Image: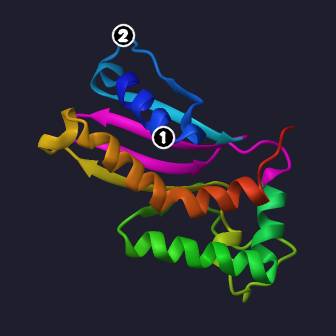
Amino acid sequence: MIALLNDVADADPRYEDFSVWHYHTNSWWWQHQGAVIRLGHKIEIGLRFDLDGLRIQGAWWYPAPGQVTTFRKAVATEGSGHELFSIIEDLRAKGYDISGDVMKRPPRGYPCDHSCTDLLRHRSLIAAYPLGCDDWLHTPEAVGKVLAAADDLDAMLTWLVRHVNSST
């Protein structure tokens, strides 16, 4: 994992701030190796090796105080909200699973018929994709697969850094 992340960081300096989670004593941790590449406050790319192969995700989760409010204001704004909606639809079309902490109803103060109601319900946003467990996994080709998936996630993560990133 560390060698993969170093190679990814060498290819793109935006990915230099990474950490690998250490192993624990229970079986889940030694069957799953995880790492994150931090792009902003609570905004990151996650990688996980497990028995199913390599999985990548772009995520804004465990939001800092005020980030959910900032996210919703950006989503409710005509231009930026439709931009994120288009980005999410593009990721879905590419096979990414879109998830996160989602409320059952739209938040107070926003109309139920807002064009981005589904996004307004999010308190976190995750786009995940399994890269698989093919022969390329233990070759230098893995770096290319990770970078290609990171390119897919770039529009969403850039939007989040631009509209939600907070240093508090």
Kind of residue indicated by mark 1: Gly
Q: Residue furthest top?
A: 25
Q: Residue at x 47, y 33 (%)?
A: 10
Q: Is residue 85 left or right of residue 90?
A: right
- Quarter assignment of residue 31: top left
Question: Which label belongs to residue 46?
Answer: 1
Residue at 49%, 34% in the rendered image: 9
- Residue 43, placed above or below residue 156: above
Where residue 44 appears, x then y in whole percent? 59, 43
Q: Is residue 35 magenta?
A: no
The circle on residue 25 is: 2
Crowding near pointer 1: few (<14 within 10 Å), some, many (20+)?
many
Question: Disc 2 vs disc 1: which is toward the camera?
Answer: 1
Q: Which residues are magenta?
A: 41-67
Residue sitting at 64 percent across and 42 percent down? 39
For this view, does 150 lie left or right of residue 67?
left
Q: Residue at x 77, y 61 (%)?
A: 71
The kind of residue tagged 2 is: Thr
